[in-house]
Amino acid sequence: MNRDYFKLIADCSKRSNVLFKITEHDSNGPISEKGLLRLSHPEWIPEQFLDNARQNDGYTLQWETRPGHPERPECEGAVRVLPMRTMLRQWKGHIYFGWPEEPKRRRAFKIVDFFVNEACVGFYHDAQCDPGLYFFQLGEGVEPYPLHLDLKGYLTLLNYTLGYRYWQLAVLRQLPDDGRNPSYRSDLNFLDEFRRDLGAWVPEFQYEEFVARYRQLKLRDYTPSMP
């Protein structure tokens, strides 16, 4: 079996452990083939999700900067890639509330990486079989916004950011401002902080390399399946 997904997660864990104070870490191990067959509508799940679950079905990493470095900025990071059964649950009260004005397709949105309580990355689990991931800011009144990344691309960029808090906004900043991109309604200082913090704590981090890698990983000939 190809172990690419497991290696991406393992590398992220190892590097984070060297550089930061780990406050939470857990890895669930693989899901069984019987477990995959019991998932809701497995035919709608992108193959990358299934391959990842066969190697490691759920992963948590949370870190904070080590004390004793007053010359460096404090920061934190988190990754919470949910197990498939949790990922595919009904997210009423988090993603949708059943209000008449809500887009009906919001019910099909499933959380993949619940990295903070206020925001997540997820995908649409429905017959459109969209392979792309979307950033979603809970409770902000905006719909999920496409990152133009599949799961493997997302996990690959984790090895550049190590799950730095809200690193996904640095990806959204690479996309055109279409008036609804949530990165343009965030803290205007975020990108400067992202570059400063990772540059201070991760010796090999180069923002230009991160941007170049994203452009390589960005899905080609891809049309997001918006609500």
Image (spheres, rainbow, N blue to C red):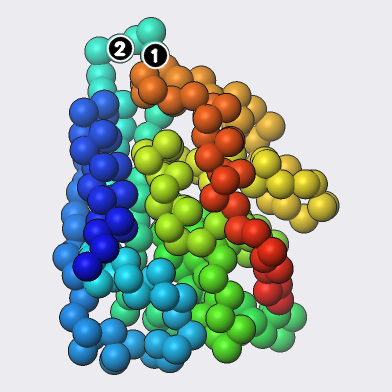
Mark 1, other Cα within 10 Å: few <14 / some 14–19 / many ≥20? some
Figure quadrant of the C terminus: bottom right
Secondary structure beneath disc 1? loop
Residue visible at 58% across and 75% down?
A: 130
Residue 219 locus on image (x, y percent):
60, 58
* Residue 41 visible in this rendered orientation of the protein: yes
For the image shown, how many numbered marks are present on the structure? 2
- Residue 39, quarter of the rendered image: bottom left
- Locate residue 23 relative to residue 223 in the image: left or right: left
Where residue 72 is drawn, which disc sits there?
1
Residue 120 locus on image (x, y percent):
49, 58
| Residue, disc 2 | 69
Residue sticking out furthest to the top: 71
Residue sticking out furthest to the right: 179
Secondary structure beneath disc 2? loop
Where residue 216 is drawn, which disc sits there?
none
Q: Nearer the viewer, residue 165 or 224?
A: 224
Amino acid type, callout 2: His
Residue visible at 31% across and 26% down?
A: 65
Residue 190 locus on image (x, y percent):
60, 32
Mark 2, other Cα within 10 Å: few <14 / some 14–19 / many ≥20? few
- Locate residue 10 relative to residue 174 in the image: left or right: left
Residue 46 locus on image (x, y percent):
46, 76
Amino acid type, callout 1: Arg
Are circles 2 and 1 on residues that touch, CB within 8 Å?
yes
